[in-house]
Image: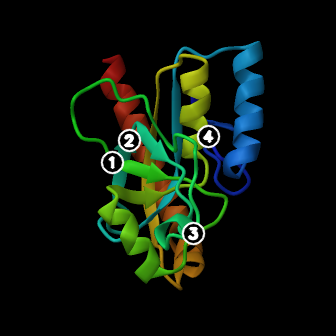
């Protein structure tokens, strides 16, 4: 099953799950309880902490939930805040998730030192639910912005093209897998 966030980030081949960590967790849990999918593929936009360029397509099976306060030693968590469905030995790009969009380039560059390269609001929830229900899962992302003071404006400016690129990428990958 292919899923996406929703609102203005929908695709004709994906079922919307909600915006952010909580909506996504609630709706995906409900889906899994009543009609458990064989696999989950999340498709969405992402912000880059600096390594990836606008319109890069990123595939990942690893997500984190690291808040900005952690980067400045103003918070800690007793929870395991990284989840992965990656069963291969290859290195995976880590996607950070939060209910907030980062806009402080200086602070978010610290994510790179932790091995975290991009952010998407929903992906951590998706992988946690997939893990709970033992469902293979992954994500495909298109970079729409950098995590700086222009994040929102760049997201709006690049979102339509990013959705087109994601649509092309996913449909090509599906064709490759079915032929």
Q: Quadrant of residue 2?
A: top right
Query: Upstream in the sequence, badge 3 or badge 2?
Result: 2
Kindly indicate whether the residue at mark 2 contacts the one at mark 1 (C-beta within 8 angstroms). yes
Query: Upstream in the sequence, badge 1 or badge 4?
Result: 1
Q: Which mark is residue 60?
A: 2
Spatial CA span between label 1 and label 4: 16 Å
Spatial CA span between label 3 and label 4: 20 Å
Q: Is residue 13 visible?
A: no
Query: Label 1 belongs to which residue?
Result: 93
Percent position (x, y) of residue 10?
Answer: 65, 48
Q: Nearer the viewer, mark 3 or mark 4?
A: 3
Task: Tell which residue pokes out farthest to the left in this image.
Answer: 90
Kindly indicate whether the residue at mark 2 contacts the one at mark 4 (C-beta within 8 angstroms). no
6 or 86, which lies in front? Answer: 86
**94 sits to left or right of 164:** left
Query: Label 4 belongs to which residue?
Result: 125
| Residue located at (32% from left, 68% from top) | 53
Kindly indicate whether the residue at mark 2 contacts the one at mark 3 (C-beta within 8 angstroms). no
Identify whether 152 is placed above or below 143. Answer: below
Query: Upstream in the sequence, badge 1 or badge 2?
Result: 2
Query: Upstream in the sequence, badge 3 or badge 1?
Result: 3
Q: Which mark is residue 31?
A: none
Query: Label 3 belongs to which residue?
Result: 69
Neighbourhood count class around disc 1 (C-alpha, 10 Å): few under 14, some 14–19, many 20 upward: some
**23 sits to left or right of 150:** right
Query: Upstream in the sequence, badge 3 or badge 4?
Result: 3
| Residue located at (51% from left, 20% from top) | 39
């Amino acid at each position: 099953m292919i899923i996406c966030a929703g609102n203005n980030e929908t695709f004709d081949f994906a079922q919307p799950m909600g915006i952010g960590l909580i909506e996504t967790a609630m709706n995906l849990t409900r889906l899994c309880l009543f009609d458990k999918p064989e696999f989950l593929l999340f498709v969405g936009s992402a912000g880059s902490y600096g390594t990836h360029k606008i319109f890069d397509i990123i595939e990942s099976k690893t997500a984190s939930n690291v808040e900005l306060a952690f980067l400045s030693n103003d918070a800690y968590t007793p929870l395991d805040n990284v989840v992965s469905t990656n069963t291969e030995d290859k290195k995976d790009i880590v996607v950070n998730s939060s209910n907030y969009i980062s806009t402080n380039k200086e602070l978010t560059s610290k994510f790179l030192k932790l091995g975290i390269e991009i952010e998407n609001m929903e992906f951590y929830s998706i992988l946690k639910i997939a893990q709970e229900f033992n469902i293979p899962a992954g994500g495909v992302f298109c970079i729409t912005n950098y995590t700086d003071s222009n994040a929102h404006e760049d997201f709006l400016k690049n979102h339509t093209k990013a959705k087109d690129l994601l649509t092309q990428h996913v449909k090509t990958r599906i064709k490759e897998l079915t032929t």
